[in-house]
Image (cartoon, rainbow, N blue to C red):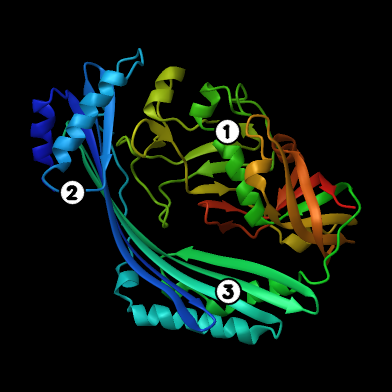
Amino acid sequence: MKIDKFFEIAAAKGIEAWQLRVSKSQAISISLFRHEIESYTVSDSQAVIAGGIVNGKFGSGRTEKMDKATFPFLADRIVKETTYNEKPEVADIFPGSEKYHKHNVFNPNLCKTPISDKLSLIKKIEDAIYAADPRVADCEVSFSERGNESEFYNSYGLKLKEKSNYFYIGAEVVMRESEETKTGYSARLANDLSEFESEAFVKELTESTGKKFGAKSIRSGKYPTLIDREVMSSLIDYFLSSAIADEVQRHSSMLEGKLNAKIASSKLTIEEKPLTKNIFFSYFDDEGVATQNKVIVKNGVLKQYFYNRETAKKDGVETTGNGSWGGGRIGTTYGNVFVKPGKIGKEELIADIKDGVYITDVMGLGTGMNSTNGDFSCQAEGFRIVDGKISEPLTLITLSGNLLKMLKDLKGFANDAKMTLDSISVASAYIKSMNIGGN
């Protein structure tokens, strides 16, 4: 793509400064159901997002087409949008950071591995799931692979590029026993197939699903609670969304006015590490700002909000390199989050619980969470904890409370931290007391 051509067109249209983001991706997806290929797709996608300044106002345009008309179209969109921009402040384009921490996280071996080998792998997983437990009635196994390339340019001569790829293996199983039917799901996200352990994957899925049979409800009350790392990831995600400066400045965040205040247990430390060399690595944000590792919560004290350049100006601080640009206005995002784990296993962590609950699944958290005050209520499944041991399965229960109070009641984390699909690494958490609704 001849970027200089856009520079010429932008200048002719009266655009004073500009930035351009080019994204390309290639994807493969295979799905097996009942030993047959249910779907097989190969796709390529691309997008160009451009932004520019006209008379001190910012405008942008987006297209998925790349031809002779692309640059004139984007320039016209920028000019048109600036005429509608009524923001009083004068916009600008970021020239570039002094230093960028580049790393190569692209794994060429992944895309070189033949499709036939990837298909054989998920067939092997499917066969193993059926063989693992006679109660398995159905299962669906899928493999997805995606490669991403991103390029960033601006009128100050900044040129940034990064490339990544990953695979995703997911499996859903249906088990039946007498009149009961239980389902389970498990997934892995990585970019090195040689490190994928299919036997452990199948064992975890089938054993966790098989343990759900014979589940009952529980008497409603307050219980010491162990929250599984997958569920904890979702709760931490909601917490962090309130640390986005956009939300704070709109007065829709539960963390407004709490900067440098103790808002959680001393056991809670959260860092965002975009420079960690994994599949979520990114060394620049969508404004061309160099990313940086940062502490969000340290020993329960809120230390940092997530900023883009616009929200940082409003608060008189520096951007944190979390700008996110999907077209239109530039927002804020985060990723590669690490919650400091504990040093002991789940069994040792819950050894002092005489009568408690272990929550392994939640449903409806998206509609059951009030992001402004942190109150939440959702359906849940899990197990009882009796005399420090995980006991019989539970169903038809609800988990409710307040997210900030829950984090203040955090007694500790286990040592089973795992990077989830939300790009959050977190371990199972012991909460002093949670509201459990049952019978």
Q: Nearer the viewer, residue 292 or 403?
A: 403
Q: Which residue is mark 1?
A: 242
Badge 3 element: helix
The numbered mark at residue 418 is none
Q: Are marks 3 and 1 in contact (CB under 8 Å)?
A: no
Q: Nearer the viewer, residue 378 or 392?
A: 378
Badge 1 element: loop
Write the residue at 80% across / 76% down.
179
The numbered mark at residue 66 is 2
- Whether 297 is drawn above or below 112: the answer is above
Q: CA distance from mark 3 to mark 1?
A: 34 Å
> Can residue 250 be seen by looking at this rendering?
yes
Q: Which residue is mark 3?
A: 201
Give the percent coordinates (x, y) of residue 28. Answer: 36, 68
Left or right: residue 165 versus residue 397 is left
Write the residue at 43% across / 51% down.
276
Badge 2 element: loop
